Amino acid sequence: MYKIIAATLVCLLVFSCANYKLTPGGRKIKVIKTRKAHKRCEVVGKVTGIHEKGSMALAKNQAKNKAADLGADSILFNEEFSNGSVSSVHSTAYLCK
């Protein structure tokens, strides 16, 4: 029984940490700084990045990875929230031509 619990915990730790590293697609995502800059772009979708240990940078990495998965090439970070233990960023993913 302990082996099953230990194996489950190891899997959870491995997969939860891997989610925050930038993927090859996430590395290609450009950050749009202002709302005006995206006028020539098409909205692909809304994405949220969350990091349960309070790192905003890692929450943004997760959002970039999700944007890349949607086929976006750019992202605008709309809102950032942090309560000390959890950080989240609500973003819009764009395809700019």
Image (cartoon, grey):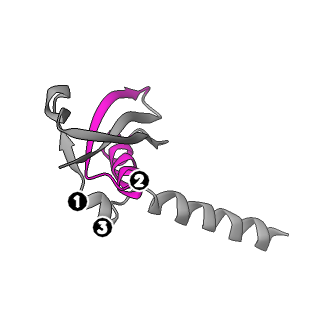
Inter-mark Cα distance, 2 to 1? 13 Å
Q: Determine the secondary structure under disc 2.
A: loop
Question: Which of the 4 image quadrants contains residue 76?
Answer: top left
Chain-order first, disc 2 or disc 1: 1
User: Disc 3 marks which amino acid?
Assistant: Pro
User: Disc 1 marks which amino acid?
Assistant: Lys
At x 53%, y 66%, the residue is 14
At x 36%, y 36%, the residue is 91
Inter-mark Cα distance, 3 to 1? 7 Å
Tell me where the magenta segment starts and ends, as one range: 55-83
Q: Nearer the viewer, mark 2 or mark 3?
A: 2
Badge 1: residue crowd in 10 Å (few <14, some 14–19, many ≥20)? some
Residue highlighted by disc 1: 28
Badge 3: residue crowd in 10 Å (few <14, some 14–19, many ≥20)? few
Q: Position of residue 43 (x, y in %)?
A: 33, 39
Q: Nearer the viewer, mark 2 or mark 1?
A: 2
Question: Which of the 4 image quadrants contains residue 28?
Answer: bottom left
Residue highlighted by disc 3: 24
Question: Which of the 4 image quadrants contains residue 84?
Answer: top left
Pointers 2 and 3 in contact (CB under 8 A)? no
Q: Position of residue 7 (x, y in %)?
A: 69, 71
* Badge number at residue 70: 2
At x 38%, y 44%, the residue is 59
**Is 18 placed left or right of 71 in the picture?**
right
Pointers 3 and 1 in contact (CB under 8 A)? yes
